Amino acid sequence: MTREGGPAARVWGRVWEALRPLDPYRSVKAALGALVIGSVVITTFLVFVAIRSATELRVITIFSIIASLLITQFVAHRLTAPLDEMTEVTRAMAQGDYTRRAGAGRRDEFGDLAAAFNRMAADLEAVDTHRKELVANVSHELRTPIAGLRAVLENVVDGVSAADPETMRTALRQTERLGRLVEQLLDLSRLDNGVVPLRARRFEVWPYLAGVLKEASMACVSGSSPRARKDVHLHLDVSPPELTAHADAERLHQVVANLVDNAVKHSPPHGRVTVRARRGEGAESLALEVLDEGPGIPESERHRVFQRFNRGTSGTPGPGSDGGTGLGLAIARWAVDLHGGDIGVAESPRGCRIRVTLPGGPREQS
């Protein structure tokens, strides 16, 4: 007996694969060929019987036609059944039902078509689910700042509160939050439409990141967010100091700003957020890390961190966390993908560490 996986088994496997196009269960063309051969064999057999039994030729012809029609009908029904099923599924999808699937148990070309059709149906179901979630989440996110702004303005109009600087600052914060959400949605719209160009250039990393952190620090000190963090210390670590990189400065600003903002929100009182930059593996490539001292991200949730409108389900948010829109990290991932880089949550003994790698160097745009 030949041991499984031995030379003889491999030879038979190659022979079987060579004969696969002739298998009527694996090829529509083979099935049609078998139909023709079967019809010819039946007709020849009936003619032979007619010659031996002196039966009239017209009788044999009628029987041959009937037999051929029956065989053709059987084979045609078997071949077209998947198409009929996919037609029904398509009609259901046109009416909004994306849960139905076509049978994919066949081994021929129709089986491959049914499998591809089911993948398409699953993608459409995911898109429809995402669309519904997007509408619900955007409606909720827009309603919150609009309701707050309306309440402030109604109090001023009704004379409940005076139009003093503090009241106006409250209205301004709500307006800024609304503006940030609209800008993020516009970024995602550009992402989906593929209309965002990448304008990469060479720049010095230290002064660039220092400017980004200065803007973030000013935002904390000025209290432009509803729960500003004035107690969190921002630290920059670039080595070597003359490090240069090749990237789109505006898109990279989105990455760093969103990561720092997320880290500040989840930092403990008087915490520390560190932005670390090192040279990557390639020429003018860049490896960035943003570290905080917050509760960190559970390993079970790390694969969902960069999904749109994801705000986490576990862990203790920092004092500066206001729920957010759940779009910042999704935009960061988009900007990194635009560069052809990678972004992810790295292991850290304390807090959260998000690592970004950019390939550097000129990159062809499609």
Image (cartoon, grey):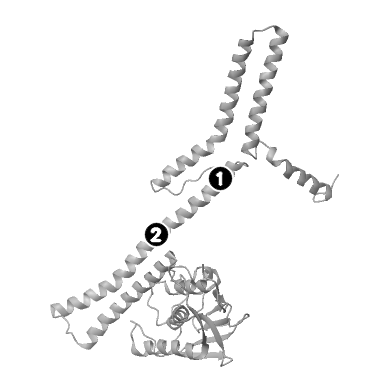
Determine whether the residue tagged by mark 2 lies in a helix, strand or loop.
Answer: helix
Alpha carbon distance from label 1 to label 2? 27 Å
Please give the name of the residue rendered at 35% of the width and 62% of the height, measured from the top-left corner.
135
User: Which of 172 and 361 lies nearest the eye of the viewer?
Assistant: 361
User: Residue 185 placed where, x, y %?
Assistant: 37, 69
- Residue at point 22% right, 74% down? 150
Residue at the top extreme? 54
What mark, if any, has residue 131 been given in the picture?
A: 2
Name the spot of residue 265 as percent of width and height, x first.
42, 81
Tell whether 259 sits left or right of 361: left
Quarter location, residue 343: bottom right
- Side (left or right) of 30 relative to 308: right
Q: Mark 1 — residue? A: 113
Which sits in the foreground, 119 or 129? Answer: 119
User: Is residue 187 shown to the viewer in this render?
Assistant: yes
The single residue placed furthest to the bottom in the displayed view is 241
Quadrant where the N terminus is found in the figure: top right
- In this view, the mark in front (1 or 2): 1
Whether residue 269 is visible to the viewer of this picture, yes or no, is no
